[in-house]
Image: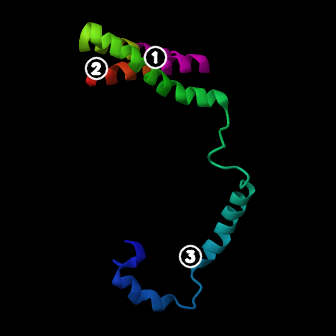
Amino acid sequence: MAGGVLADEGALKRAHLYEHRITAYFIFACIFFPGIYKRKQMHMHETDYCKYDNQILTLFTSSLYFAGLISTFGASYVTRIYGRRGSILVGSVSFFLGGVVNAAAKNILMLILGRIFLGIGIGFGNQANL
């Protein structure tokens, strides 16, 4: 659709009706949008990348992925010794514990612990599917 290749011909026929005219939409846009522009300019020193520069939030986010990565190594051992059934059982118990801990969380440490359990469940679940 780039370049207006499939433009509506009806809209092009009406374009001459609005040439050199000030419409209500034009007035509304002139009043409303400069306020948004000024508000956005006030926050130009912030970026979306660094808006949440918090180590605890980073730990909360990455704990699930890191636990899944590390638990995959242990899951390969469990799968080799006990088979897929053992790996699936460990993963499902870990998922259950992670859900319970996250549901009962009172602080950020409990949330991180619950995400670690969920990550272990992901690691074991991935190993069982291979």
Q: Nearer the viewer, mark 2 or mark 1?
A: 2
How packed mark 2 is, by other alpha carbons closer than 10 Å (few <14, some 14-19, many 20 or more), is many
Name the spot of residue 129 as percent of width and height, x first. Answer: 27, 24
**Mark sitting earlier along the chain (3/1):** 3
Q: Is residue 114 left or right of residue 12?
A: right
Q: Secondary structure at mark 2?
A: helix
Disc on the earlier residue, 2 or 3: 3
Image x and y of residue 101, in percent: 49, 14
Please state if 39 lies on the left or on the right of 97 as rendered.
Answer: right
Q: Determine which residue is flagged by label 2.
A: 128
Which residue bears the numbered disc 3?
Answer: 25
| Coloring basis for residues | rainbow
Q: Quadrant of the N terminus?
A: bottom left
**Segment tinted magenta in the rendering:** 97-117
Q: Quadrant of the C terminus?
A: top left
Q: Is residue 66 left or right of residue 129?
A: right
Amino acid tagged 3: Tyr
Residue kind at label 1, given as amino acid type: Phe
Q: Is residue 100 magenta?
A: yes
Q: CA distance from mark 2 to mark 3?
A: 59 Å
Residue contact at pointers 3 and 1, CB within 8 angstroms: no
Secondary structure of residue under mark 3: helix
Q: Tell which circle, 2 or 1, labels the residue nearer the N-terminal end.
A: 1
Magenta run includes residue 6: no
- Counting from the top left corner in percent of width and height, residue 116 is at 49, 19
Residue drawn at x 28%, y 7% is: 81
Magenta span: helix, strand or loop, mainly? helix
Query: What's the distance in space between the residues labelled 2 and 1, CA to CA?
Result: 17 Å
Name the residue beneath numbered marker 1: 117
